[in-house]
Image (cartoon, coloured by chain):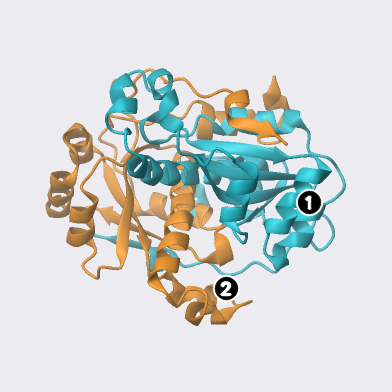
Chain colours: A cyan, B orange
Amino acid sequence: MTADALVLDPAAQDLLFREARTANTFSDEPVTDEQVQAIYDLVKYAPTSMNMQPLRVVLVRSAEARERLVSHMMDGNKEKTSKAPLVAILATDHEFHEEMPTQFPHFPQAKDTVFAERPVREAAGSFNASLQVGYFIIGVRAAGLAAGPMTGFDAEAINKDFFSDGEHSVLAVVNIGKPGENAWFPRSPRLSYDEVVTTV
Amino acid sequence: MTADALVLDPAAQDLLFREARTANTFSDEPVTDEQVQAIYDLVKYAPTSMNMQPLRVVLVRSAEARERLVSHMMDGNKEKTSKAPLVAILATDHEFHEEMPTQFPHFPQAKDTVFAERPVREAAGSFNASLQVGYFIIGVRAAGLAAGPMTGFDAEAINKDFFSDGEHSVLAVVNIGKPGENAWFPRSPRLSYDEVVTTV
């Protein structure tokens, strides 16, 4: 039993990974701002390159904004996006370098040297914000909530509709809440260790 | 105290996020294959789009391979990469779609339709493998080990040297082990909730 090689408590392993599932239906119980703040205040500590923290989160709470978002989702994602207690848009802020003088005080010049050019910021920003999407999903589970991360949407339409500055790119839309009835599909298989890990 | 809004045990919160730090030095204690297998067998359950699981991991165990890898790292990363008990190369496999008929049985045609074209696979693969890099870092911490994820390297050289098929792109190189003396820099600040999260 390889789980014995881990230090993390087995109940926490189950909560975050083994028993956590992508939910497709949700109960009516609301997700509070306090819960989202607790999630953020936990996962903000996970690492990014040069502490750049390019992830931005938009909580879609108004009925009007929810309707606009649902219109940009692929058909198979519309119903659950319209019904989830909370929906979050997770995006890369391509202007993350503006924060680097305070966030990476070891090298405050990074803003105007390494990250002066937009293509460099896009590549580094989207990789690191993607790491942060992974951390955020784990954080939702740490709050005892189910996450329903989705990538099936019209990204250009969401960017235009929710980020009028042209400096943000959506990475994922995440439904959040307590699971409802028949919330899960049967779990799909996973690649085995030997299919993924090699040694040289 | 927003941590009260979380269900995850506070000790687990500390282990994975609050007290975990990116290590820059390591002890001599080896990292076993059993530990890596336990890490993989935990984090493999975290979600990817359509269960695509594009991450591949190369454990650099031989002195000869370690030397080659170190030669591709940026100067500031060479010493720790040469001294860490274990170094892993984390990469996207752009041929992940070959596994989809078994891994995503709901839609076995995905391999030859949605993901038939390489540019689509590159975009979806690199986003999802990046999520998996985030999960992997959390998994290293779940094993009671420190991770030292790095992006400062010659990516083209690593791809050429370690993935001769031309179908893999390195995302991160991660040093793994028990922290050594003076393993951490002082923790850099984090963006506040209000700087990252907005509501519409």
Subunit bearing disc 2: B
Q: Residue A124 falls in which quadrant of the image?
A: top left
Q: Which of B58 and A135 lies nearest the eye of the viewer?
A: A135
Q: Is residue A136 left or right of residue B36?
A: right
What residue type is disc 1 on? Glu
Q: Are marks 1 and 2 on the same chain?
A: no
Q: Residue B106 falls in which quadrant of the image?
A: bottom right
Give the number of the disc on residue B104.
2
Which element carries disc 1, helix, strand or loop?
A: helix
What residue type is disc 2 on? Phe
Front disc: 1 or 2: 1
Residue at 29% of width from left, 22% of height from top?
Answer: A109
Which element carries disc 2, helix, strand or loop?
A: loop
Q: Is residue A25 left or right of residue B145?
A: right
The vertical placement of A60 against B56, above or below, is above
Classify mark 1: residues with Cα within 10 Å, few (<14), some (14-19) or many (20+).
Answer: some
Return the residue at label 1. A67
Q: Residue furthest right?
A: A28
Subunit bearing disc 1: A
Q: Can you give x and y, in whole percent of width and height, for residue B142 in the image?
A: 49, 41
Q: Which of A3 and A30 lies nearest the eye of the viewer?
A: A30
